[in-house]
Image: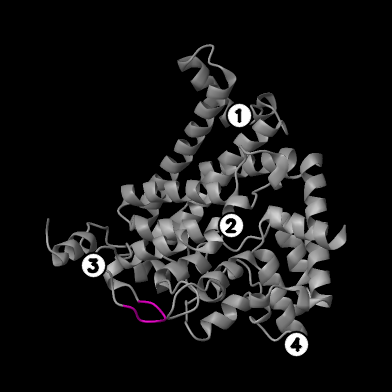
Amino acid sequence: MGSRADLDRSYLDRALCLQACRANQSRGRLKDEPESGTRTAFQRDRDRIIHSSAFRRLKHKTQVFVHDEGDYYRTRLTHSLEVAQIARSMCRYLGFDEDLSEAIALAHDLGHTPFGHAGEHILMTCMRPYEGFDHNAHSLRLVTEIERHYAGFNGLNLTWETLEGLVKHNGPLTGPKADGQADVPYAIRTYCQSHDLEIESFASVEAQLAALSDDIAYNNHDIDDGLRAGLFDEGELRQIDFVNDVYEGVEALHPGIEGSRRKHEVIRRLIAMMVEDAIETTVQSIDESGATCVDDIRALDHSVAGFSPQMKEKDRLLKEFLWTHMYRHKEVVRTTDHAKGVVKDLFEHLMECPHELPAEWRDYGDMGNEAARARVISDYIAGMTDRFALNLHAELFT
């Protein structure tokens, strides 16, 4: 076995493309730490995310359904793993740092509330008088402040590149390159005062590919969950022309295939179709950009990871179908309306009775200051699993 120095070189000198982030050229961590002899900085980021409490809680946070809808449906945890797998695959093929992209993919949903987007929407409403709530900003707050396991710092002390990707994977937040000019979320704005994440520019290709992988994963896996739940059937899905083409291709190769296998074959072909298009489009976009390093990527006025115009249209058709047949389905609306009531009740009760917060949470902020109290309570509720929120609500209001 080689020496420790050999291990350093074998990990740090991996062949990456010119525009990739390099762990041995990282801008570092807010709190300086000795480097590892067996893992790169980005590998350590990924491992810290996996070992965090927030990551474990994703197991009991839903994508669309509340927890009692069945064990086979996606949770935030399984979704994050699926996003990470797609991101790693694309980075490996294209020559970008797959560990960085995986870390960003695994962390991208840490800040989601219980009950999926329904929980987030009502918490945003509750927090509107107190500078709002945003799940992406809450992810940053978790990994920089709320997680408290290490002796030398709060949070996970992740590298600048991972934090940049976490905050900007969907694009710049301010400036002429931003998609719209919404207010920068409170948690991001305050954090950047002491650790500038350059929110006016694009993030690395690794971060952009993680965001694209999120799009690919949730479209196709929501199709799987929607079919399994009976919210729509394959006949309705096949009304989308390009999806029907995939069905016909599977049936031609496997005549008489049973329904569950046919569904899986169709979904994996849809994922492959989108991944292959994303790879080809990203290569072309990087070549046309003239970028020769990651800072050139950040300085561009557009993202380089994306779909072709033809695939964007297919992506739009899938989203439109899922919105109509799944997210606005009466059964989903029924459960999400109940979930909104749970979150609203918990927020209002804890604002009136902050002494009922766990002791460690009362120490996170000034309970006598209304805005500070609201921020602590929103942090507490956002960290709840679906089951915990339902049980606490039953305990308080039954």
- Residue that carries the numbered disc 1 in the rendered image: 241
Outermost residue, top side: 256
Residue shown at 46% from the left, 80% from the top = 153
3 vs 1, front mark: 3
4 vs 1, front mark: 4
Q: Amino acid at mark 4?
A: Asn
Mark 3 surroundings: few (<14), some (14-19) or many (≥20) residues within 10 A: some
- Toward the viewer: 129 or 350? 350
Residue 284, image x, y percentages: 37, 51
Q: Are marks 3 and 1 in contact (CB under 8 Å)?
A: no
Q: Are marks 2 and 3 in contact (CB under 8 Å)?
A: no
Mark 1 surroundings: few (<14), some (14-19) or many (≥20) residues within 10 A: few
Figure quadrant of residue 258: top right
- The residue segment tinted magenta is 28-33
Quadrant of the drawing holding the C terminus: bottom right
- Residue that carries the numbered disc 2 in the rendered image: 57
Decide if residue 368 is on the left or right side of residue 280.
Answer: right
Mark 4 or mark 3, earlier in chain: 3
Q: 95 above or below 371?
A: above
Between the residue at mark 4 and the residue at mark 3, the CA separation in whole angstroms equals 46 Å
